[in-house]
Image: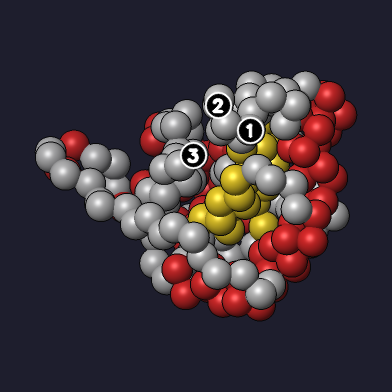
Amino acid sequence: MTHTLHRQGTVENLKDDYVVFTMSAKKVNAKGSAVKIKRFFEILEKHNAVNYGDMKTGNSFNSSRDEIYKNIKDTSIVHFVVTEKREVAAILNELAEAHLGTSVVVSGLIDDTEWACKKAGLKMHTVEFSGGIYGRLDTLPEKEVLELTTMCGHGMVAANLVRDMVRKIKKGKKSLEDAAQELARPCQCGVFNPKRAEKLLRKMV
């Protein structure tokens, strides 16, 4: 999976940004996997997530918890965002004990992700790195805006929405928290990190 792979930022401001998600494989173990994905949801919701969701239903800022949970199907991909690597380790430890049998992906800084795996007694199976951005780089939004928009791997958070939130914060029309949550709503999968967004917005204003 690559939609959480291209988050822009520095080592420092990515240290509180981890996405953990699960999915089944079509024609391999998808049939009947909804019950396992629901168990994954139940485990992760205990671990201080700042956002979560399933792209078929929505995220925690545009849909209710019960709506997301109820609509989990064999083909669902359920995501949770946490801000502590120790929380990732605790999640992986509990998932290892649960033996769900679905694929689990952790997106985050490689050293911290490896640490969390080792802490849970696990070895990373596969590692993917982003190859960066190529082409007309001069047409991209400014770096500070990209750090926010790339937290939505499907490009649903618009650069102009980020700029609008910055303007409204400066004018006192939006708090940092409200602006971050408004940016989180369009990210259907629920992989946008509103707590990191607050810090990035604070720096921009």
Residue labelled with disc 1: 29
Residue 59 location, x and y as percent? 68, 33
Q: Nearer the viewer, mark 2 or mark 3?
A: 2
Q: Which mark is in front, 1 or 3?
A: 1
Q: Position of residue 9 (x, y in %)?
A: 39, 60
- Return the residue at label 3: 152
* Nearer to the camera, 35 or 68: 35
Tell me which corner region of the image, top left, top right, bottom left or bottom right, holds residue 135. top left
Mark 2: few/some/many CA within 10 Å (<14, 14-19, 20+)? few
The residue located at (53%, 48%) in the rendering is 170
Helix, strand or loop for disc 2:
loop
The image quadrant of residue 56 is top right
Amino acid type indicated by mark 1:
Asn
* In this view, 91 is above or below 73: below
What kind of residue is marked 3? Answer: Cys
Q: Residues within 10 Å of mark 1 (few under 14, many from 20)?
A: some
